[in-house]
Amino acid sequence: MGKDEHHKSKNNFLSQTPKNQKSDGIDVEFSEELADHEDKEAQQRSDQANKRIKGK
């Protein structure tokens, strides 16, 4: 049993995931060591698209 099971508090300022957390919908893990040519090409296209979006 963890500490939280014994001490219930209404104001839990140390929660792991905030309830009002907003997500951009992107949940991707990327490893440069394991990336092949197609992965790197896709990453470049993604970076270029993000720059176009931010440029508007």
Image (cartoon, rainbow, N blue to C red):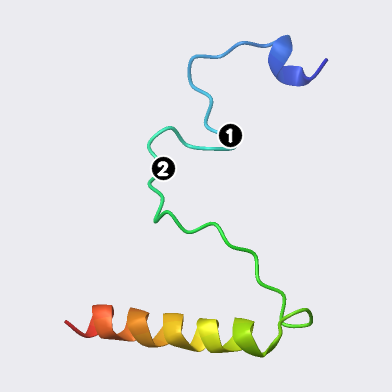
Residue 37 falls in image quadrant: bottom right
Label 1 residue SS: loop
Q: Residue at x 42, y 54 (%)?
A: 25
- Closer to the observer: label 1 or label 2? 2
- When the figure is inspected, residue 42 is found, relative to residue 22, above or below; the finding is below
Q: Looking at the picture, which amino acid does disc 1 mark?
A: Leu
Residue 5, percent from left and from top? 72, 12
- Structural crowding at the residue carrying mark 1, measured as other residues with C-alpha within 10 Å and reported as few (<14), some (14–19) or many (≥20): few
Label 2 residue SS: loop
Q: Gap between marks 1 and 2, in whole Å?
A: 14 Å
Q: Please say if the residues under marks 1 and 2 sit with CB atoms less than 8 Å apart.
A: no
Q: Residue at x 55, y 89 (%)?
A: 41
Residue 51, percent from left and from top? 32, 85
The quarter of the image holding the N terminus is top right
- Which mark, residue 35? none
Q: Looking at the picture, which amino acid does disc 2 mark?
A: Gln
- When the figure is inspected, residue 46 is found, relative to residue 22, above or below; the finding is below
Decide if residue 25 is on the left or right side of residue 7: left
Decide if residue 32 is on the left or right side of residue 19: right
- When the figure is inspected, residue 19 is found, relative to residue 54, above or below; the finding is above
- When the figure is inspected, residue 15 is found, relative to residue 54, above or below; the finding is above
Residue 38 falls in image quadrant: bottom right
Q: How many marks?
A: 2
| Residue bearing mark 1 | 14
Mark 1 and mark 2 lie on one chain; the one further toward the N terminus is: 1
Residue 32, percent from left and from top? 72, 82
| Residue bearing mark 2 | 21
- Structural crowding at the residue carrying mark 2, measured as other residues with C-alpha within 10 Å and reported as few (<14), some (14–19) or many (≥20): few
Residue 6, percent from left and from top? 73, 9
Decide if residue 31 is on the left or right side of residue 1: left
The quarter of the image holding the C terminus is bottom left
Decide if residue 54 is on the left or right side of residue 39: left
